[in-house]
Image (tube, grey):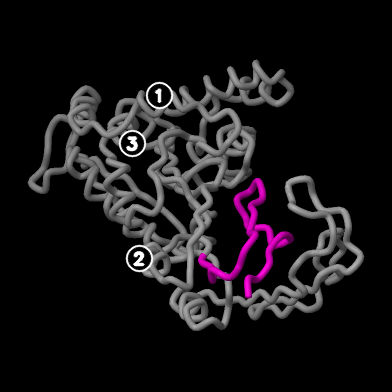
Amino acid sequence: TSNTVVGSGPFILESFVKGSGSKLSKRADYNWGPGYATHKDPAWLDKIEFKYLPESAVRLGALNSGQVQVIDAIPPVNYAQVKNNPKLDVITRENPGVPRVLYLNSDTGIFSDLKVRQAFQSAIDRTTAVKAAFFGILKPADNILGPATLDYDPAIASQWGFDLQKARRLLDEAGWQQTDSEGYRVKEGKRLTVQFTYSSNDVEAADVTLFQAIQYQVKQAGFELKLDPVDSGILSSRTAANQYDIISNYFVRPEPDILRTVFHSNYIPPKGNNFSRVKALDSQLETAVGASEAERKRIYYAIQHQIIDQAWAVPIYIPAYQLGKAKQVQGISWATNAKPNFYDVWIQR
């Protein structure tokens, strides 16, 4: 293992302290700026200092006081406060790739029944839940790929969505026709219970609010959704052992091949992130990799439709980079992975 950093970018790493931050200085002889930049020569900034401030309140306080000029992850509850501050601004950049998704385990348990998966999908009012959790800052997802992703199919949005009556009808058809005293569906003496296991270290407070809103929504159809926050080690062991009903995550990637990581059978846990445990898409996902542009688009459109039609996953919201900054900071651009670039940045005096 080596601590040596080798790179060819416009900044040089001067120091790094684990848990504290890092300091960069501009490369004086740099003259090979990328094509998307506004110049080719050395960066406008002389130095950049990154500070590790994990608490959102501390980050926000540092921005408000002028101790820092840019912060990551503006809390949704504070968005309007920052946006209305005449000295500050918020830049939102939607992530490409797979949005925040609920993966339904189609291999075993309750969700091995297609109609039950479709009922669960139809019972979720994404627009209302996302608005309640994120104060209208983030957009509900309408597909397994985000709109900023290559070969995203916008037509899918109109083909599915919240429909409580449909959810109830599908559960009736699946044999879950009775309800108990608490309003949950039952069949053969068993309650319609699903377990949503997630890592408590990998979600924000707003995500938990979102999960609780979904918990309430699906109860209206008769699902008992149990939220099960665990540490990352337990989450890994449960997914490896196929002991879960729902898992959630998102992936930032500009190209649709990310679907291979999420839905190819080679990546069923413990080998990867195919938490829906889908095996039916392998051939299409493999063919798309070397296909022509037109053929690739056709294949990925078909895959997106199939994922939604089969209710292997329920897209919830489109993650976005929420960058708070002092208005004097100018020239921020964005990489294809929705991360900020500071090469063109300058400070307005």
How would you rate the neighbour count of disc 2 (Cα within 10 Å): few for under 14, some for 14-19, many for 20 or more?
some
Disc 3/disc 2 C-alpha distance (Å): 36 Å
Residue at 17%, 38% (x, y): give it: 185
Q: Quadrant of the N terminus?
A: bottom right
Q: Viewer-proximal residue, 27 or 278?
A: 27
Q: Which mark is residue 309?
A: 1
Q: Is residue 22 left or right of residue 53?
A: right
Q: Viewer-proximal residue, 86 or 149?
A: 86
Q: Earlier in the sequence, mark 1 or mark 2?
A: 2
**Proximity of marks 3 and 1: CB atoms separated by less than 8 Å:** no
Q: Secondary structure at mark 3?
A: helix
Q: Is residue 329 magenta?
A: yes
User: Residue 156's x, y, as percent?
Assistant: 42, 25
Residue holding disc 3: 110
Residue interval drawn in magenta: 324-349
Residue at 86%, 70% (x, y): give it: 4
User: Residue 226's x, y, as percent?
Assistant: 30, 52
User: Residue 124's x, y, as percent?
Assistant: 29, 40
Q: Secondary structure at mark 2?
A: helix
How would you rate the neighbour count of disc 1 (Cα within 10 Å): few for under 14, some for 14-19, many for 20 or more?
some
Q: Nearer the viewer, mark 3 or mark 1?
A: 1
Q: Earlier in the sequence, mark 3 or mark 2?
A: 2
Q: Earlier in the sequence, mark 3 or mark 1?
A: 3
Residue at 58%, 74% (x, y): give it: 69
